[in-house]
Image (cartoon, rainbow, N blue to C red):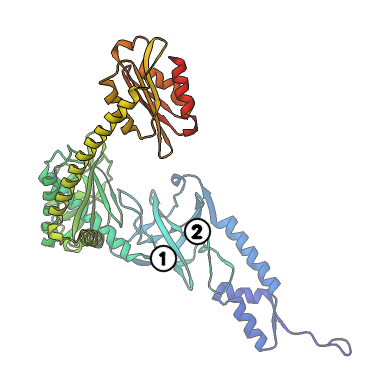
Amino acid sequence: KGAAGSQPPVPQLRGEFAFKLYDTYGFPLDLTELMARERGLTVDVEGFNRLMEQQRARARAAQKKVVIELSQIETTTPTVFVGYEQLETPARVLDVVEFKDQTAVILDTSPCYAEMGGQVGDTGLLRQGDRQWRIVNTQRSGDTWLHFLEGKSQKAPGRGTEEPVPAVGSEVILAVDKERRAAIQRHHTVTHLLHWALRQVVGPEATQKGSYVGPEKLTFDFNAAPLSPEQLTELEKLVNERILDNAPVTWLEVKYDHIRHRKDIMQFFGEKYGEWVRVVQIGGTPTGLDGYSMELCGGTHTRATGEIGLFRIVAETAIAAGVRRIEAVAGLEAGRRASQEVALLKGVSDRLATPIPDLEKKIDALLAHQRALEKQLRALQQAQAAAQAKGLLTRAQTLGGIPAIIERVDADADTLQALVNELKAQFHGVILLGGVANNTVALVAGVSPEFTSKIQAGKLLQQIAPIVGGKGGGKPEHARGGGRDASKLDEALARARALL
C-alpha cells in the first residue's frame, strides 16, 4: 500500500517475461506494451532492452567468427547438397562467420549451388519464422557451403531493432531463387551443346580452356583460329537444331576408373578427379553413357534441351594468343536481345523513312553519297590550301641562313598538314605551321632534305611543343605535335624562330 493520499503503484510485467515472449515466441515488444496497457499494466522496457543487448553481445562474441581466407572455413559436418533435385529444404545452422565484411551462414543441408566450374553461385531466401534474410551468393570451402547474407543485418518489421543472424543450432528454411537458377541452367546446358557443335564445325582440336555460366549470359573459351562468319552461323544452326530435338539431359555418378579412358566423355583443365565423378549426358538412352554430348560436370542443368529456348551468339573475340572466346545468350535473355535488336532496326527504319527489308540498300546509297561528298571536300580543301599557300610564300624569311616559313594559321591538324604538303611542293627550307581549333593546339613541321643536316623537323617540335603543354616528334623531314595551352602558341612559334 502507498502512503495516505498517494496513488497505488501500477503493476508491471517483468522485462524477462517480455523478452521471453519476443525471443521464444516472436512476440513484438510494442504489441506486448499495447496489450499490457489495455489491462492496466506497464512493461519493464529498460529490463527488456538490457536483455536484448546481452543477446546481441553473445551473438557477436560467439556466433560470428572472423576469417581471412575461405580455406580457413570447414566444419566437421559437411554440407549436404540437394540442389540437383530440390530448390527448397529445411536445414540446421552449423556456424555463422564474418568474411570480408560479409556474414555467411553455414548449414547442414543446402539446395543452393556453390560457385564452381565456371557456374556462379545461387542466390535465395533464408527464413526462420517471420524473419528472413536474402542470400546474395553461395560459395564453398572443401565440403562446407557458405551462404552470404545481404548486408550485415536486416531490420525486423515493426521492431526497429537489428535482427540477429540465425543462431547456431537453430532450424531454418532455405529456398533458391528459381527464375535465376533456371536461367543459369539454360546457359550451362547450352554451353555443353556449344562445345559439341564447335568440335563438329572446327574439329576435335578445339578444346575448352575456360567458361563462365551466369543468369545473363555464357562465355566459352577455346583454342582455335578466329572463326569465320559462316562458321558462327553454322554453330548457331547446329545448337538450335539440337535444342528443337528436345533430347533428354541426364546425369550419372560413376567411378572415375570406369570412364577415365573413354575419349567420348570430355574431361578438362587437367583436373584431379575423386573416386566418384558425375557425367552429364545429352541424348542417347538416359544415364546410358551413350549420348552425343558427355562431359564430367558438377553443375546444374535443364532436364531436356527444349527447355533452353532460343540460342544466339553475341560475340567471338580473342582473349590471348591462340585462345578465342564466344559470348552467347539463351532462353529469355536471347529473346530480350532479339527484341532490342528489332526495336533498333525499327528505329533506324523510321529515321530513314525506309522499310526494314530495304534498309541495306538505303545504307549502301547513303555511304556512297558520303564518299562522294568526302571526295569533293578533299578537292575543295586542296584548292583552299593552294590559295593559302600562295599567301604564306610571300611571308618567307631567312633565319640563320635557312629559308623558313613559320606562321600561325588557326585550323586543325589535318588542314595544317594539307598546307604544309602544298608548300613543300613550291618551297625549299623549313616550314612550321601552328594553329588552334576546338581549344587544341596543332603543330606541323616540314624540312627539305637539303637542310636536315642543320635542323630536323622532329627535334624542332620536341623543343617547342612543351611550351603549349604538349609534345611532338617525328622524322627529320616531317613531324607533328600539339598541346592544350592555346595562349602560348605565339610564344612557341617565336621560340622556333630563335632556334633557327
Residue type beneath disc 2: Gly
Looking at the image, residue 240 sits to the left or right of residue 386; the answer is: left
Callouts 1 and 2 close, C-beta under 8 Å:
no
Q: Which one is in front, 133 or 144?
A: 133
Quarter of the image for residue 474 reads top left
**Closer to viewer: mark 1 or mark 2:** 2
Looking at the image, residue 455 sits to the left or right of residue 343; the answer is: right
Which sits earlier in the primary sequence, circle 1 or circle 2? 1
Q: Residue at x 19, y 57 (%)?
A: 311
Is the residue 24 above or below the residue 180 in the image? Answer: below
* View extreme (right): residue: 4
Looking at the image, residue 274 sits to the left or right of residue 408; the answer is: left
Which residue, given by chain and number where applicable, does mark 2 sit on? 151
Q: Residue at x 15, y 56 (%)?
A: 359
Q: Is residue 116 visible?
A: yes
Which residue, given by chain and number where applicable, does mark 1 sit on? 125
Please identify the quadrant where the N terminus is shown: bottom right
Q: Residue at x 37, y 12 (%)?
A: 402
Please identify the quadrant where the C terminus is shown: top left
Mark number for residue 294?
Answer: none
**For the residues marked 1 and 2, what is the alpha-carbon distance in whole angstroms?**
13 Å
Q: Residue at x 28, y 58 (%)?
A: 184
Indicate the position of residue 290 as horizontal and vertical percent values: 11, 53
Secondary structure under the numbered disc 1 in the rendered image: strand
Indicate the position of residue 314 as horizontal and vertical percent values: 23, 51
Secondary structure under the numbered disc 2 in the rendered image: loop
Is the residue 283 above or below the residue 32 in the image? Answer: above
Disc 2 crowd rating (10 Å Cα; few below 14, some 14-19, many 20+) is few
Indicate the position of residue 356 as horizontal and vertical percent values: 15, 60
Is the residue 284 above or below the residue 459 in the image? Answer: below
